[in-house]
Amino acid sequence: MLYQHKRARRSEFLTKMEGHIKELEQLSHKMFYEDLTLGLESRKRFLQILVAISQSNDQELIQKAADQFPVNSLYNKPLFSEAEATAFGIVLTRVRKHIEKLLLFNCGLYTHQFSSIASAIMGMNEMIDEFCVCHNELDSSDVDTMCQILPKINKKLCIVKCFAGEKGSRNANEEEKLKLQQALQQLGNKELMIQLDDCGSELKNN
């Protein structure tokens, strides 16, 4: 009787998770193209599903979620909780396709959330063409993590007002710019640029 009960609960759990996978597939197709305001609920729902799947610790389900990860994704104001950033990272590191755009714009990212996502990027087998962390609340020390993920980015890292300042988010200071420039030079990727502000300032490996 106990065995049958456990089996029924497992079946119910798998049915629920497969429903989540199907919903992820639907969301991944429309999230990037939705209006930033109207699409906010879709982005929040996407993160909620990632949390549920990652907390299941079912590696097959996590891989299925990673296979539904959109090639182009824009997140604007779903504010990432630590649980959501952790789940996002767990799934992202399993992605097996080339990512064109991963734009985490105005997501309330602090050091812990950013570290979870950056670690996932470093663990990916694939590359990202464009990665954006504009308008967040990162610490100055997070510039070192940015330098570490540069080898995984092909074309553009956008860091406009991504650092926490005394009066809101701020652009990179001279010390942070220097670290990024040195990392670019060591990398040697002449196609990669770092956008520093909204006025067109950028770093390149000249």
Image: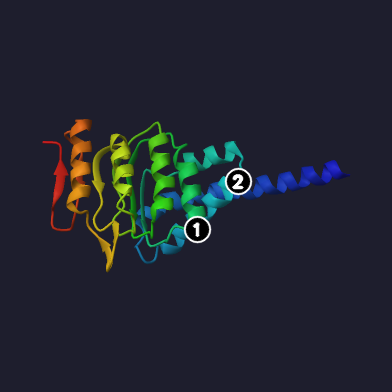
- 175 is higher (above) or lower (below) than 137: above
**What is the number of the mark on residue 45?**
1
Residue 190 placed where, x, y %?
Answer: 16, 34
Which of the two labelled residues, at mark 1 and mark 2, occupies the earlier sequence position? 2
Residue 173 placed where, x, y %?
Answer: 20, 54
User: Which residue does the image show at 44% across and 42% down from the upper left?
Assistant: 92
Using the rendered image of the protein, determine whether residue 25 is visible from the camera's viewpoint.
Answer: no
User: Which quadrant would residue 134 be assigned to in this image?
Assistant: bottom left
- 40 is higher (above) or lower (below) than 148: below
Whether residue 180 sits left or right of residue 128 in the image: it is left
Around disc 1, counting alpha carbons within 10 Å, would you say few (fewer than 14), some (14 to 19), or many (20 or more)? some
Residue 162 placed where, x, y %?
Answer: 29, 56
Around disc 2, counting alpha carbons within 10 Å, would you say few (fewer than 14), some (14 to 19), or many (20 or more)? some
In the rendered image, the residue lying farthest to the right is 1
Q: Disc 1 vs disc 2: which is toward the camera? A: 1
**What is the number of the mark on residue 18?**
2
Question: Looking at numbered disc 2 in the image, what kind of residue is underneath it?
Answer: Glu
User: Which residue does the image show at 61% across and 40% down from the upper left?
Assistant: 58
User: Which residue does the image show at 27% across and 69% down from the upper left?
Assistant: 167
Question: Looking at numbered disc 1 in the image, what kind of residue is underneath it?
Answer: Arg
- Which type of secondary structure does the marked residue at label 1 adopt? helix
